[in-house]
Each structure stands twice: as structure tokens, then as C-alpha cells.
Image (cartoon, rainbow, N blue to C red):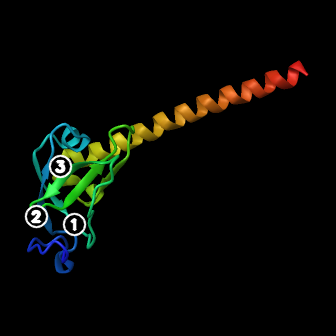
Amino acid sequence: MREKNSTLRHVDMENYDGYRHPVRVLEGTPLHDWYGLDELDVNSYHHQGIKKVAKRLEPMAYSLDGLVEAVFTPSHPFQVGLQFHPERMLPAYTGNRRVYDAFAKAVKAYHRRAHRSGSRASRAKKRKRRSR
């Protein structure tokens, strides 16, 4: 990252899938829950980073040069942003799979909520039509 004046490489085009760099994982975050580790070696394909974390977001991990590598919204069931790609390093950590399991669980819960509220609305419309 040129703007950070860092010597840490966040991408290696010569070793695209194999290159890893360490990140510090913050305790009390979903990322820490998924991985159970304080540090990970992650793949990195990005040439951009988060300059200022939005108010509703919380950092979950930092690279050694201080760049935010992962964020989440505490008030949302699954709103995360990762600067690395767990799907491209599945064998490295069991936590990589847990990220996707958490995502699938959130999608299913959202679908159930949407279906229930849609069903209620549909039933209310039918009752209204019958009462006319």
C-alpha cells in the first residue's frame, strides 16, 4: 500500500495463490470466534485498503503494518468484509470453512424471516379481501 508507506507486501503477483502475510485477529469478534486464533497467515490480492472505518463497522483484524484486514457490523447478523479470500485457502484453517457456515446460517435465517413476514402479509391481505 503506497499510501501507508509500508514495506509489507499485500499482494505478490508472482505467487498469487501461494503468498500469505500475517494478520492480528481481535478477540471478541466473529473472526476470532470462527478461527479461534490471535494470528492468521492470509492470502492477499488487494491493492486497496480501508482508510477510515465507518462508524457502524468494527475492525476484526489488522495486518502488521496497521491496515484493517477485516470488519463487521456488530448490530447485524452477518455483515462482514474481508481483505482476504478464505475460499482460496480452505485447507489452511478450519476457520475458513466456518466463515462460510456462518454466512449460510445467516442466509437461511434471513430467508425464514422474510418468508414468515411475507406469509403474514399475504394472510392479512386475504383476510381483508374476505371481509369486503
Contact check, label 3 and label 2, Cβ < 8 Å = no
Which class describes the residues within 10 Å of circle 2: few (<14), some (14-19), or many (20+)? Answer: some
Give amino acid for label 2.
Answer: Asp
Q: Is residue 1 above or below residue 42?
A: below
Q: Image point 19% across, 36% down: which residue?
A: 28
* Element carrying mark 2: loop
Q: Residue at x 42, y 38 (%)?
A: 106
Disc 1 packing (10 Å; few <14; some 14–19; many ≥20) = many
Q: CA distance from mark 2 to mark 1?
A: 14 Å
Q: Residue 42 falls in which quadrant of the image?
A: bottom left
Q: What residue is rendered at 20% in x and 45% in y?
A: 94
The quadrant of the picture occupied by the N terminus is bottom left
Q: Nearer the viewer, residue 17 or 74?
A: 74
Report the mark closest to the observer, 3 or 2: 2
Image coordinates of residue 128 in percent, x first then y, are: 82, 23
The residue beneath circle 3 is: 93
Q: Pointer 1: what residue?
A: 44
The residues tagged by marks 3 and 1 sit, at their Cα atoms, a distance apart of 15 Å
Residue most toward the right? 132
Residue, disc 2: 65
Amino acid identity at mark 1: Ser
Few, some or many residues within 10 Å of mark 3 (<14, 14–19, 20+): some
Q: Give the SS element for disc 3.
A: loop
Given the image, on which type of amino acid does mark 3 rest?
Tyr
Q: Quadrant of residue 38?
A: top left
Residue 53 image offset from top left, x and y in percent:
28, 55
